[in-house]
Amino acid sequence: MSISLRGVTKRFGEYAAVENIDLDVPTGALMALLGPSGCGKTTLLRIIAGLETPDEGTVYFDGEDATLWPIGDRKVGFVFQHYALFRHMTVFENVAFGLKVKRRRERPSAADIRKKVQELLSLVQLAWAGDRYPAQLSGGQRQRVALARAMAVDPQVLLLDEPFGALDAQVRHELRRWLRRLHDELHFTSIIVTHDQQEAIEVADTVVVLNHGRIEQAGIAGEIYDLPTSAFVHRFLGQVNELPVIWRDGRAYLGPIDISSSDMPAPGAEKQVALIRPHEIEIGSRSSGWPATVVAVRVIGPIVRLDLCADGQPIHEPLEAEISRERFEAERFDLGQKVGLRFRRWQVYPAAA
Amino acid sequence: MSRLLLIASALLFLAIFLVMPLLAVFVQALAKGFGAYFAAIAEPMALSSVKLTLLVAAIAVPLNLVFGVAASWAIAKFDFRGKSWLITLIDLPFAVSPVIAGMIFILVFGAHGWLGGFLKSQHWHVIFALPGIVLATLFVTFPFIARELLPVMQAQGKDDEETALSLGANGWQTFWRVTLPNIRWGLLYGVLLCNARAMGEFGAVSVVSGHIRGLTNTMPLHVEILYNEYNYSAAFAVASLLALLALLTLAGKSFLEWRQPELRRAARMPQDRTRRTNS
């Protein structure tokens, strides 16, 4: 099922949780709504689910106006961050719930329900857990039960609200990959809400970044990291170093490095800032580039993170650089070593943004 | 050492103010032997007061059950204007003296009250009759169930209900299959307390009942009349029934707390409960 939003606005009192949102989710897509807390991503998901009614705008399901459809009629499966399993029911009864509450005419026979629930439990690798109660399962297992339960009613859309937010890193990672595989096998339309940029990029086809109730940028998961269109998205999608752009005699500098180019925006009155990701900093010999001192070295598995204090920069704001372990082993940067910095890539934004 | 001292003083206090009076009730009740005890209870006026008390509780508790569930459901699961005002209103009977509650009903329903003329023309008896006693009891026991359910429901949030709706359940199915099982222990607990108070209420009922022997005397009122007539052993015999009810309520309460750790925590740490309510 394809979903479209046109001019969707939702206010809570004076505060606009989402404002004038246009969004298209094609059939079979896996889209991530990404943003800091309070950006409106959950409200947007709840509007799509039918758990909130927008104050303005229209929600279309397959081109039909579904704005006022009750949640039960939307064929959506909704998964909460805290699982929302029915604690007084066994895992089996939880998954069977959506089938058992159907009207008598549409309700499958007890044997069919049993078969379907068993299939779903196998799909989420919990075939053994049917008789357990939710309290007896781990967080990751509970979330898989919640997914199986949502899928029992054959939803055409799966809506996940920070589904892995309450799990530890290892389980998160496994469940993300598993969700991706499941999506590829079953081809429903999925929307996942997350504040974790890595999760969004890892799991989704398209990523929509929200801020203050508006869409900042939407793009293909692999590209949005490299091509942010605003300083907010640039900062939100990963670590950045921020350096003021200094104009001298009509040329732009970062420290002593001349970054002038023909497509560089004219200085004007406002200040500019350059955003540089840690892996875009190149560390060379003292004689080339911006003179700097290594003030911290941290080896994190395959990568090594270095804090570098560049000459003329405040000492408490060292630049953060990332290099590969191999590179580090070959060059062996030591604490206090004098080096020269160059920037492979940077992006300039107005400083106010 | 100081801990022992604290515990000892608490126990001493409880012994003097709770255990001794309770024992005294039973000692007094049986002062003239078992024969007199049972005679006092089996006496027609006493029996009628027991019946009336049971009848009043049987009407008031279910009504407050429905009200309590509806109110806490509305407050915990929906946002609406005047919500905090409604919460305050629910607490009103806790703040108002029961005697005043009784006076309010006299003022509204009494012979010279606002609705008195109308009621008289319809030959409906409210004050000095069963309806008045039920109304007064309803008012006084109004907050018990709602107050017990509210923190439970607020702590549980709306996720379960929204999930049920998303799975195609209608409102009724959601209530019976998801909400009610989630709150059942808290509900039972509230009903227990509500019932104890409904049977034991004195002040408000005393004002509206008119003390008509064999007709509008509930157990607490009957105890008072017997006592005022210097009929101590009979008074304490009937009182012992009420005391027994209190003990049963306590036993039931402990059982529920033992059965449901969440209630135990709520009962032991009221400050924790308010924190959960606010979050």
Image (cartoon, coloured by chain):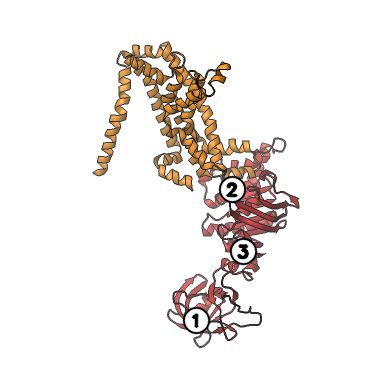
Query: Which chain is assigned orange?
Result: B
Among the two numbered marks 2 and 3 on one chain, the one whose residue lies closer to the N terminus: 2
Amino acid type, label 2: Val
Disc 1, disc 3: CB below 8 Å?
A: no
Q: Residue at left 28%, top 35%?
A: B11
Q: Quadrant of residue B269?
A: top left
Lower position in the chain sequence, tag 2 or tag 1: 2
Is A140 left, or right, of A207 in this rendering? left
Q: CA distance from mark 2 to mark 3?
A: 25 Å
Q: Position of residue A98 (x, y in %)?
A: 64, 42
- Say yes or no: labels 1 and 3 on the same chain: yes
Tally of marks:
3
Three-letter amino acid code at the position of disc 3:
Ile
The disc label shown at residue A145, or none: 2
Above or below — where is A202 with respect to B143? below
Q: Quadrant of residue A171?
A: bottom right
Amino acid type, callout 1: Glu
Q: For numbered disc 1, what is the local secondary structure?
A: helix
Mark 2 closeness class: few <14, some 14–19, many ≥20 residues within 10 Å: many
Q: Chain of mark 1?
A: A
Report which residue position mark 3 lands on: A201
Between the C-alphas of marks 2 and 1, the distance is 50 Å
Q: Which residue is mark 1?
A: A331
Output the letter for the chain in red. A
Q: Is residue B233 left or right of residue B126?
A: left
**What chain letter is assigned to the residue under label 3?**
A
Q: Nearer the viewer, mark 1 or mark 3?
A: 3
The residue closer to the viewer here, A45 or B74, is B74
Categorize mark 3 by other alpha carbons within 10 Å: few (<14), some (14-19), many (20+): many
Residue located 68% across and 52% down the image? A56
Is residue B191 something that shows in the picture?
no
